[in-house]
Amino acid sequence: MCPARRPHAAALPTLEGDGIQLGPWPERDAIADAAALARLHADPRAMQYWSSAAWAPEDRRRAQSFLDDVEAGARSGRLLRLAARRPGSPALVGWVTLFRIEPPRPRTEIGYLLDPALWGQGLGRLMVGLALDHVFGALKVHQVEAEVDPENAASCRLLNALGFRRDGPLRQGWRADGQPHDTAIYRLAADDWPI
């Protein structure tokens, strides 16, 4: 039997919530996960406010590269990208990333993506809340930052509901499709969590 291609990604922690689970990227799910990643990243609704352009439909090469980055980040400990799934289902419905984890640096950044078919159910808030519990508890980070397109009202509401404070904007902080875009900076300190 060959060794797992992504052993570190398969060994990430599992975080359980009511209606959502964050956790590893098992090798047995790699083909289905790559297909789900390609579909999610090609969805114009999911990528509308993203800092990069949507993927071409069925771009499995980029999906495999994404999964390789999950493994490299898990191996280095500097990036923690957790797969989001509904309890009892192997289907990938999104992900949460904690990046720029560089002890003794006391802060990290967070990003997230949820299948648009599941928007409006509170699952994004649950996903980010589980990740915050982990980052402030197990990882002992003191501050989490998020950069959001200020026109992404749903994501701004999600962060506000979790206690983040808006510190931005960062004028022309992102370039997407060759155009500059402003960024809203949100921060949450460990002392302010849980809300």
Image: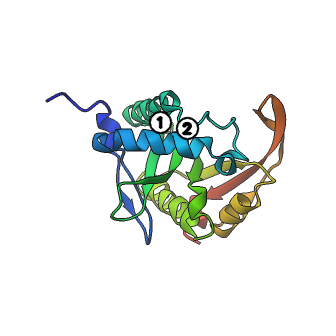
Q: Residues within 10 Å of mark 1 (few under 14, many from 20)?
A: some
The tag earlier along the polypeptide, 2 or 1, is 1
To which residue does mark 2 refer?
A: 100
> Where is residue 127 shown, x and y percent of the image?
51, 60
In the foreground, 138 or 111: 111
The residue furthest front is 57
- Residue drawn at x 76%, y 55% is 152
- Residue drawn at x 62%, y 35% is 55
Tell me the kind of residue under disc 2.
Answer: Arg
Q: Is residue 76 left or right of residue 149?
A: left
- Residue 166, quarter of picture: bottom right
Tell me the kind of residue under disc 1.
Answer: Arg
Q: CA gap, disc 2 to disc 1? A: 6 Å
Q: Callout 1: helix, strand or loop? A: loop
To which residue does mark 1 refer?
A: 78
Kindly tell me whether residue 150 is visible in this rendering.
yes
Q: Callout 2: helix, strand or loop? A: loop
Residue 52 drawn above or below residue 36? above
Quadrant of the drawing holding the C terminus:
bottom right
Quadrant of the drawing holding the N terminus:
top left
> Where is residue 15 shown, x and y percent of the image?
39, 59
In the foreground, 176 or 80: 176
Kindly tell me whether residue 106 is visible in this rendering.
no
> Where is residue 164 shown, x and y percent of the image?
67, 61
In the foreground, 109 or 181: 181
Q: Are marks 2 and 1 in contact (CB under 8 Å)?
A: yes
